[in-house]
Image: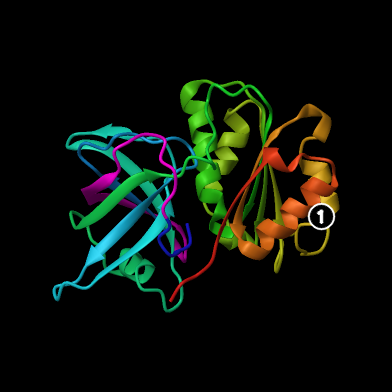
Amino acid sequence: MTERAVATGTPARAPIRWHVGRLVERRVETPSAHTLVLEVPEWPGHLPGQHVDLRLTAPDGYQAARSYSVAGPAVDGPGGPRIEVTVQRVRDGEVSPYLIDVFGHGDPVEVRGPLGGWFIWRPEETAPVQLLAGGSGIVPLMAMIRARRATGSKVPFRLLYSVRTPDDVIYADELRRRVRDDFGLDVAYVYTREAPDEWRGEPHRVGLADVNTHGWPPDLEPLTYVCGPTGFVEAVADLLVGLGHPSRRVKTERFGPTG
């Protein structure tokens, strides 16, 4: 997820402490977003939607930390559990440029978590789920999509994903594959600057018609998760409440770049 200042949250389990993780794999998602696979021995586990703090320490002792959403379930590796975070480069950022451009295979990073006890989806839930993402806000929502498949949940999911251009779609290939293979998952896109030729309409920001067409009606009482830049989250949450979704069932997480 886009770099943001560290904020503590209510953990799903305790204790929360710093672990030393090491980079074991990197995947390029877009020109500005990379997925980092970190091997973190003694990782306590996490729930879909939670995040971690990553902390870097310079040779002179200076430290910088930022929070990033975990992108999917932990998996077992030869050296311990592995978790994924997707980092988007922030112009003039303090942490994300290092993680994307410098951080190398086997390099250490301190990891604290899991953090956050509100913006989570539990696989035992039975209500339909609607996910609304802006830009790199897709990351915690992708964790929920991946957890749905991993746990065999049959709960229907609908994702509405707003991006600037087709090249900015994070997890593009995987989302296409999951729409094909994951029964009950629907994905729709809104493009704000440049749309592909096959997309109907002109580029625009997410509006009432988009939410109404690609979301669940309020009478189905879906669980709703909205994640993205502050302006996107506030606008979409207002649209959902205006359509009749109870605010208590609209969970939001927002972020903004930090210098």
Q: Nearer the viewer, residue 68 or 62?
A: 62
Q: Where is residue 225 drawn, in percent x and y?
A: 63, 43
- Tell whether 139 sits left or right of 180: left
> Label 1 belongs to which residue?
200
The answer to if 75 sits in the magenta stretch is no
**Residue 207 position by quadrant:** bottom right
- Tell whether 58 sits left or right of 210: left
92, above or below 172, in the image: below
Residue at image coords 40%, 60%? 6
Quadrant of the snapshot with the C terminus: bottom left
Q: Where is residue 44 drawn, in percent x and y?
A: 29, 34
Residue at image coords 63%, 24%? 155
Residue at image coords 85%, 51%? 209
Q: Where is residue 208 drawn, in percent x and y?
A: 84, 52
Amino acid type, callout 1: Arg
Q: Nearer the viewer, residue 127 or 149?
A: 127
Magenta region? 8-33
- Tell whether 92 sits left or right of 141: left
Q: Secondary structure at mark 1?
A: loop
